Amino acid sequence: MKLGRVRLVFVGARKGVSKWPNIRFDPKTRAKELIELIEAKYSDIEFIKYNIVTNRAEGEKVLEELGKLNEEVLVIFNL
């Protein structure tokens, strides 16, 4: 039995936009790396949705979706 239902949201500027740590940083690649690590370490948690947000419109779409999958926890990573 899984301990909970979690949605992960990764927020960061698109690749090629001047930002930390550098202009070549790709938030989508980093999010995928983190998802693999998190799922491996916390196999007793059900991760139901992953969102990568790189602009306001994508963020607003995530806000509209919140709760529709009965997630119990929202974790936001600032990339």
Image (tube, rainbow, N blue to C red):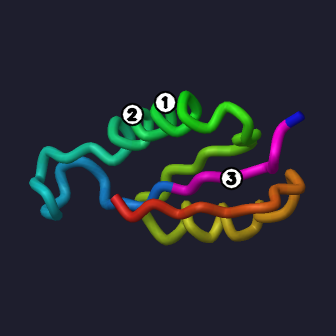
Choose top left, top right, bottom left or bottom right for residue 13: bottom left
Q: Secondary structure at mark 1?
A: helix
Would you name the residue on which mark 3 appears?
A: 7
Q: Tags 2 and 1 in contact by the CB under 8 Å rule? A: yes
In reply to whether residue 66 is colored magenta, the answer given is no
Number of marks drawn: 3
Q: Which residues are magenta?
A: 2-9
Residue at the (44%, 34%) spot, across then down: 32
Q: Residues within 10 Å of mark 2 (few under 14, many from 20)?
A: few
- The quarter in which the N terminus is drawn is top right
Would you name the residue on which mark 2 appears?
A: 33
- Position of 44 relative to 54 (above/below): above
Residue at the (55%, 61%) spot, across then down: 58
Q: Secondary structure at mark 3?
A: strand
- The quarter in which the C terminus is drawn is bottom left
Would you name the residue on which mark 1 appears?
A: 36
**Sequence-earlier tag: 3 or 2:** 3
The percent coordinates of residue 64 (x first, y second) are: 75, 67
* Majority secondary structure of magenta residues: strand
